[in-house]
Image (tube, rainbow, N blue to C red):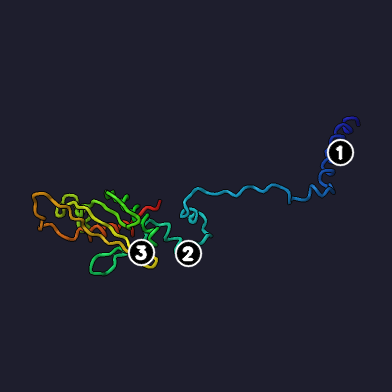
Amino acid sequence: MQIIFKNFIPAVLLAATLVSCGTTEEVRYRDTSMLEKPPTLISNRPAGEQKGADSSAEPDSAESEGEAKTGLGTKVYMADSNSPLLIIKQPFDVAWSTLAQALKQQDIEVADRNRELKAYYLTFDPDDYDPESTFSFFKDDYAKEDYLLKLEDRDGETAISAEAVDKPKPDSAPDEDRPADGAERLLKSLHETLRDDLIKE
């Protein structure tokens, strides 16, 4: 009888404790509005990967998908005109920086720049750009020359023209065997970089 009583007391105490905890009438234990909420986690993954991970998430728009890619795509084009023109669909202030990034990316030597005059002065070898050949660096059809890039604001777009800057060569006549489309090659080279390969900083 004594053994049964010894085993019975702990069981009764345990049951009483459980009942007292489960049947409390105090409001402060039932109100969960004051509990701290867990923080919202922000992923460090690029936007493209986040969308891929969450299959239910839909892209905001076609524009946001395009911006995830490198290059400006259709926001840059070559205009049909008598002299070649490169058009960036950006206002001058933005296009100025965009062009600087493209020049830096192509390792084109910028000798000077003047924002007030909307001009870049640079040195370029047109032999470096030949879309027809994979061995353009072996060619020497063009002379490495100084060029002037002029930017012009046109209703929210920026037109860029290029022209060779003549340097007087002592005791030498101009080389008439050299092709004269170096400025056009410069603009086409910049066009391809801006359209397809521009890395946004």
Q: How many marks?
A: 3
Residue labelled with disc 1: 12
Horizontal and vertical percent position of residue 71: 36, 57
Q: Which residue type carries mark 1? A: Val
Task: Tell me the CA gap for discs 2 and 1.
Answer: 66 Å
Which label sits on residue 49? none
Q: Residue drawn at (38%, 68%), measured in percent from left and top?
A: 155
C-alpha separation, residue under disc 1 versus residue under disc 3: 89 Å
Residue identified by numbered label 2: 61
Residue at the image position 29 percent from the left and 59 percent from the top: 150
Which residue type carries mark 2? Ser
Of discs 1 and 3, which sits in the foreground? Answer: 3
Which residue is denoted by mark 3 in the rendering?
A: 153
Neighbourhood count class around disc 3 (C-alpha, 10 Å): few under 14, some 14–19, many 20 upward: some
Of 20 and 11, which appears nearest the observer?
Answer: 20
- Residue farthest along the top direction in this orientation: 2
Camera-nearest residue between 9 and 82: 82
Around disc 2, counting alpha carbons within 10 Å, would you say few (fewer than 14), some (14 to 19), or many (20 or more)? Answer: few
Specify which label sits upstream in the sequence, 2 or 1.
1
Find residue 108 and report its horizontal and vertical position in percent: 27, 50
Amino acid bearing label 3 = Asp
The kind of secondary structure element at disc 1 is helix
